[in-house]
Amino acid sequence: MALLYSRKQEKKVKVMFNNGLLLVEKEGGKQQVFPLEWFPKLNNATDEEREDWVQTDKGIHFNKLDLDISI
């Protein structure tokens, strides 16, 4: 018999948007800043689309936009 369980993934980064910028704050407070113009899908996205993201081994994946950003 297989045991199935769900474990909520702990996000180790914060993702914020401000004045045409994507700000990613990593564990320890280090920040990376990207102009949204580099990511047209993200630049034109709704708040709902921007808020639907997960942290991956390589960065951030925005689910509704099918967009990966390496950090």
Image: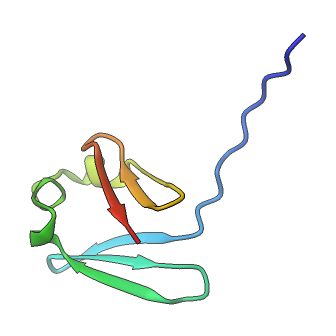
Q: Which of 66 and 53 is in front in this view?
A: 66
Q: Nearer the viewer, residue 16 or 34?
A: 34
Q: Where is residue 40 in the image (x, y as percent from the top left)?
A: 9, 59
Q: Where is residue 13 in the image (x, y as percent from the top left)?
A: 52, 70
Compared to 15, does 19 lie above or below? below
User: In the rendered picture of this protein, how many numbered marks are placed on residues?
Assistant: 0
Residue at 42 percent across and 87 percent down: it is 31
Compared to 12, does 68 lie above or below? above
Q: Where is residue 3 in the image (x, y as percent from the top left)?
A: 85, 21
- Left or right: 16, with 49 as reference point: right
Q: Quarter-wise, where is residue 69 in the image?
A: bottom left
Q: What sort of colour scheme is used for the picture?
A: rainbow
Q: In which quarter of the image is the N terminus?
A: top right
Residue at 27 percent across and 47 percent down: it is 49
- Left or right: 48, with 1 as reference point: left
- Furthest toward the right, the residue is 1
- Left or right: 39, with 16 as reference point: left
Compared to 51, does 29 lie above or below? below
- Left or right: 61, with 54 as reference point: left
Residue at 41 percent across and 59 percent down: it is 60
Q: Where is residue 36 in the image (x, y as percent from the top left)?
A: 16, 71
Compared to 68, does 36 lie above or below? below
Q: Quarter-wise, where is residue 65 in the image?
A: top left
Residue at 24 percent across and 79 percent down: it is 34
Q: In which quarter of the image is the C terminus?
A: bottom left
Q: Nearer the viewer, residue 38 or 18?
A: 38
Q: Which of 55 and 19 is in front in this view?
A: 55
- Furthest toward the top, the residue is 1
